[in-house]
Image (cartoon, rainbow, N blue to C red):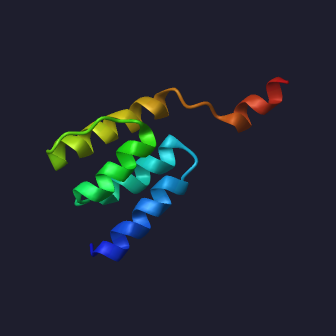
Amino acid sequence: MDKEEMTAKMMDFLDAKTASEKIRIFEDMREADEHVLANIAVSLDVIITDDAEENYNRIMSELKLRKRFEVNADRLSGLR
């Protein structure tokens, strides 16, 4: 994946509304460079290191945690 495609993926990631959407996009970003991973980490408030693979795994772990506690607003709208 070239730099333009990776930047487009990053923008899609940053625009995604749910953790599920972010995971789907992030799964295709396995080869992201440190700059892209750093931007994503900042958006999620995740601390990263110098190891790209470790950073990818930290970010994915955070996304999975957020997905677990994500609230489905459509499902809850009938409770009012």
Q: Is residue 39 left or right of residue 22?
A: left
Identify which residue, 62 or 51, lies in the foreground: 51
Residue 77 percent coordinates (x, y) = 79, 32
- Residue 58 in the image, given as x and y percentages of width and height: 27, 37
Dividing the picture into quadrants, the one containing residue 50 is top left
Vertical placement of 9 versus 23: above or below? Answer: below
- Asked which quadrant contains residue 64, the reply is top left
Q: Residue furthest top?
A: 79
Q: Is residue 14 above or below residue 70?
A: below
Q: Is residue 11 left or right of residue 37?
A: right
Residue at the image position 37 percent from the left and 52 percent from the top: 39
- Is residue 15 shown above or below 69? below
- Which residue is at 43% across, 40% downward? 44
Left or right position of 72 against 10: right
* The C terminus lies in quadrant: top right
Q: Position of residue 6 (x, y in %)?
A: 34, 67
Q: From this viewpoint, which residue is outermost toward the left?
A: 51
Instruction: Provide residue 18's location: percent of width, then percent of height.
Output: 55, 44
Who's the residue at 47% across and 62% down the image?
Answer: 11
Total marks drawn?
0
Which quarter of the rendered picture does the N terminus lie within? Answer: bottom left
Seen at 27% across and 75% down, the residue is 2
